[in-house]
Amino acid sequence: MKTSHRPFFLITLLLVWVSLVQGRADTEAKAPDGEKAGVTKTAGWYFMGDKARPLMSLKALPAGVLDKLQAHLKSRLGPEFYPLLKFSSGRQADAEEMRRTNQSKDASDFRMYDVRFTWSLPDAGIESYVAQIGLREDGSVFEEIDLPAFATKKGALPLVPLKKAKAVARQHGFTEAPIETTMGYDRKTDSLFWRFSRPAGEKEFFVFDPAPRDGAMHFYNLEISAHDGSVMRQYLSRAIN
């Protein structure tokens, strides 16, 4: 007796189709702005002596230092942004070692604590941003956190989403892959920016840098303000061999 497998095939095909549709719906629900994946920003470590040790939580900081840190961040970032910060990691230097090796005139002027926080805004296309701040032994700021002073910076929030920044980038020559997208912080302007980077064509001409290039590979970089969507900077960078 001959058996037909057609009904089984049709049912399997239907299940696959339903699965694809459901998966697409889930993706759209997770990224309502149309971005399937957000960008990330990491941070590097500073050398804080051979005896530096990790901080496993904010509670590992001396009470006075923690109070100063939290008060400073709340004052700088404001009630809308500060709650987004989540402790990530940190390091604590050995005070005696740092005083002994410190070359500055003020023996207390060194990075005693290095604290990292993470935050994210998926709807804006930011998957993970690591913010970093350096503190002296008394809890005062040695190096400011790499985030704008949202509490006082007029127009800093809400952030321009990645989707809108990409539209601006397309108007400036970012239309085809490969394109690398990152987020950064500019200390001079106290601003966040979206950075787009792609290989520069061998004979591609750039008005902002018309000088002839050597045979090495170059990248075209475009930085767009994450606060108002304006172009902050355009430049070429030489590939590292």
Image (cartoon, rainbow, N blue to C red):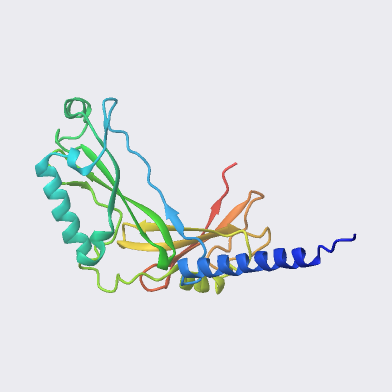
Check the image and report above or below for 156 versus 195: below
Residue 70, x across and y down, in percent: 16, 52
In which quadrant will I find the C terminus? top right
Residue 185 is left or right of residue 15, and the answer is left
Q: Quadrant of residue 135?
A: top left
For the image shown, how many numbered marks are present on the structure? 0
Look at the image and tell me whether residue 31 can be seen. Answer: no
Look at the image and tell me whether residue 59 can be seen. Answer: yes
Observer-nearest of 21 and 96: 21
Q: Residue furthest front?
A: 1
Residue 175 is left or right of residue 136, and the answer is right
Observer-nearest of 13 and 133: 13
Observer-nearest of 79 and 159: 79
Q: Quadrant of residue 48?
A: top left
Q: Residue furthest right?
A: 1
Check the image and report above or below for 104 versus 180: above
Residue beneath the point at 56% across and 65% down: 23
Residue beneath the point at 24% across and 60% down: 83
Residue 180, x across and y down, in percent: 54, 57
Q: Quadrant of residue 10?
A: bottom right
Residue 123, x across and y down, in percent: 41, 68
In which quadrant will I find the N terminus? bottom right
Residue 114, x across and y down, in percent: 26, 41
Residue beneath the point at 55% across and 74% down: 171
Observer-nearest of 27 and 78: 27
